[in-house]
Amino acid sequence: MSKKIDKALAKRMIQGYKKQNNGHSTTRAGQKLSGFLVDRASLEEILKHPDNYDGIHFYIAKHHEHVDKNDNVIAMVFAGAKRNPKYAGADGKGDPGEPPYTNGDPYDHSDSCPDNCGDLPY
């Protein structure tokens, strides 16, 4: 399970990423990417099926309008995640070619920050 952290640490972590990123990952507007806003309805759609999912995967991806472009416009794809019973875990049982999780329907509704930031990046 994820653990809560204090805002000061979260801000330091975000600032560290922003400093290291140095503008390589950008929003569609060309601003330095800080994060994403995920709408509540999409999360609730995934979480309303507790027997189907153990969590949510968030994948860094190219923005759908920039997939074939040679730029660094980044988006996030997310999907419900369920432990894969076919996965060969530490016990060595199962298929070593299977991923540890399977995913439900993917979502691309995430708004980038800047433009849709909270107070943590500041």
Image: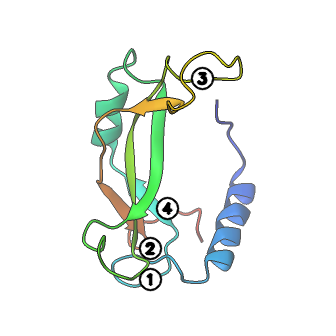
Q: Which residue is mark 4?
A: 118
Q: Quadrant of residue 68?
A: bottom left
Dot 1 or dot 2: first in sequence order is 1
Residue placed at 44% from the left, 82% from the top? 31
Cα gap from disc 1 to disc 2, whole angstroms: 7 Å
Cα gap from disc 1 to disc 4, whole angstroms: 16 Å
Circles 3 and 4: CB atoms closer than 8 Å: no
Q: Nearer the viewer, residue 112 or 79?
A: 79
Q: Nearer the viewer, residue 101 or 50?
A: 101
Q: Which residue is mark 3?
A: 88
Check the image and tell me how it is coloured. rainbow
Q: Which mark is residue 31?
A: 1
Circles 1 and 2: CB atoms closer than 8 Å: yes
Cα gap from disc 4 to disc 2, whole angstroms: 9 Å
Q: Residues within 10 Å of mark 4 (few under 14, many from 20)?
A: few
Q: Quadrant of residue 106?
A: top left
Residue 41 position within the rendered picture, expressed as x and y whole percent measured from the top left: 28, 40
Q: Which residue is mark 2?
A: 114
